[in-house]
Amino acid sequence: MDFVTEALFQYAVAVYKTLHRHPEVGFDLPNTVAFVSGELDKMGIEHTNQYGTCSVVGFIGNNPTKPTLGIRADMDALPVHEKTGLPYSSEIEGKMHACGHDAHTACLLATAQILKSHESMLSCNVRLIFQPSEEGEISGAKMMVDNGVMDGVDAIIAQHNENTLDIDTIAVHGGDCMAGCIPANLRFFGKTAHATLAETGVDAIAMGIEAYGRLKAMVREEAEGRRYVWSVGTFHAGTVHNVIADLSEQKISFRYFDQDFANRVMQRAEGICADIAAGFGGRSELDWHVSARAVVNDNKLADFVRSVVSDTTSVQSGSVSMASEDFSWYLTKAPGVFYRFGTKNEALHPVTRPHNNDYVIDPEGMRAGIRGLTAVAMRFGKVV
């Protein structure tokens, strides 16, 4: 059964355009939160902000004998100046929904309207999770998980628009989906000296260069065929040609799927850097920050999603991405699936990619997004 009426779809489009005009970033989403809360009030859906700064969580159903499905939508935009030329372009200077979170929020609000109106038909409780700061350095998902948003949730789903995927198409697969991300800051501390008396100093550049090669070789050895990324994005050291540098700094992006592999890499990297520093008579500091763990879709749940959405939407296998998503923090508490819905329409606009200032999606793709979320929620309790 297709619950997405034309009126419901036009509601979703109107929400999407309103949010697109008024983007907010990170944990600073007062207007977005007020808007989402107001829409839930109109639907008669109980909701709370108790799970953290600029979060909104709505509740449909409250039967302790039924399982609970979490559905997550991210709400934050990016600090990007929009150059799309859309009639509903951002009205906030230097901020833009350049990743489609406005569409994600619109889809979940439309889905909430359907589910609330069919609440008596549901075989599960539904937790509507509207999250801040998916794009930020500090994860909004981790904040909400730490504050208990997943307590009592049996499974969780989320979706993302995809401009390389055709309209009316959903892509989903089990297993590895998106990589974990660990940004690392590596610093070597040495001692300055005149360039002609280098032996009287401790060369921080030399330490950094040796670490660059040894760390890459170590990760390659530990990987043993696993997918990973180890990229040095910045390397800064020194000020002038005739002074030995006493500080070098590297910023590293480490992406992975296997957490045990990541743990071994981090442990060995710290030892290698300490060894290099000791050999030169210097000192090292290696700081890790896990911004997101790997998103690994539950195979059984992925099969279920594929099955129920295929009634109204074309389904294809998804692809593995080395990009990261903080949806992974929810998966530390319950199984889940992260999938994509198509927003590609080359007749309407060129295919643009997320985080670009010309990023445009076709809102028509939200029909499949709403249908997918609704289908999973309407039939979830029958398979758990």
Image (cartoon, rainbow, N blue to C red):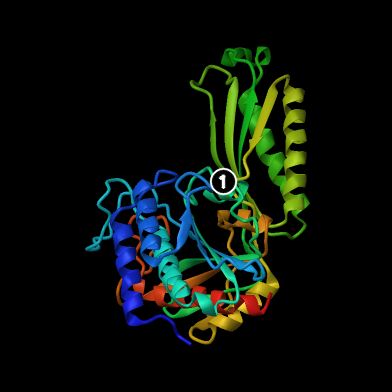
Residue 103, above or below 52: below
Percent x, y for residue 6?
33, 81
Type of amino acid at the residue the image marks with label 1: Met
Circle 1 residue: 143
| Front-most of residues 155 and 272 | 155
Is residue 297 in sight in this rendering? yes
Q: Quadrant of residue 344?
A: bottom left
Is residue 165 in sight in this rendering? no
Residue 151, above or below 218: below
309 lies left or right of 15: right
Q: Residue at x 64, y 19 (%)?
A: 190
Q: Quadrant of residue 88?
A: bottom left
Q: Residue at x 54, y 84 (%)?
A: 310
Percent x, y for residue 224?
77, 57
| Front-most of residues 149 and 371 | 149
Percent x, y for residue 352?
38, 64
8 lies left or right of 243: left
Percent x, y for residue 275?
77, 29
Callout 1 secondary element? helix
| Front-most of residues 200 and 25 | 25
